[in-house]
Amino acid sequence: MLSEQKKVEKQDHGERNAIEGKFGEGKRVYGLGLIKARLQVTSETTIALQLVIMNLEKILRDTFLSFFHRQVKKFERLFSISYTLTFA
């Protein structure tokens, strides 16, 4: 029973660390710590929009990296083909 409880606590701790890490990133990079809204609704809306922006930037970054990786692979294949044709 005790070891099972420790496993659950360790899993919870890992999940909390991931969530707190994202909030820390939001404060450092996206200005979540600078929200000055007075109303709770306005604060919640601002936070939600910041989280949407964080998600959109991650999607954009992943899309760009995927595109860039594909272009590099195409260039490598093209260079390899032209190299073998030139010196064959």
Image: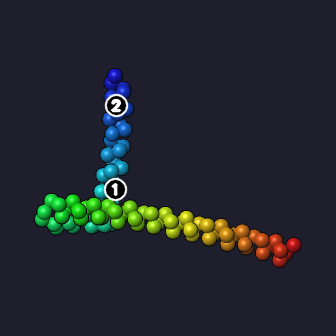
* Placement of the C terminus among the 4 image quadrants: bottom right
Residue furthest to the bottom:
86
Left or right? Give the position of 85 relative to 23. right
Left or right? Give the position of 2 relative to 80. left
Q: Position of residue 38 (x, y in %)?
A: 12, 65
Residue furthest to the left:
38
Q: Which residue is mark 1?
A: 22
Three-letter code for the amino acid on which mark 2 is drawn:
Lys
**Secondary structure type for disc 1:** helix
- Identify whether 9 is placed above or below 25: above
Q: CA distance from mark 2 to mark 1?
A: 25 Å
Looking at marks 2 and 1 on the same chain, the residue that comes earlier in the sequence is marked by 2
Which residue corresponds to the image point at 37% horizontal and 38% vertical from the top-left?
11
Residue furthest to the top:
1
In the image shown, does 67 or 9 lie closer to the viewer? 67
Which residue corresponds to the image point at 32% horizontal and 61% vertical from the top-left?
51
Numbered circle sitting on residue 6: 2
Quadrant in the rendering for residue 12 = top left
**Secondary structure type for disc 2:** helix
Q: Position of residue 46 (x, y in %)?
A: 24, 64
Which residue corresponds to the image point at 51% horizontal and 68% vertical from the top-left?
64
Three-letter code for the amino acid on which mark 1 is drawn:
Lys
Q: Nearer the viewer, mark 2 or mark 1?
A: 1
Q: Residues within 10 Å of mark 2 (few under 14, many from 20)?
A: few
- Identify whether 83 is placed above or below 58: below
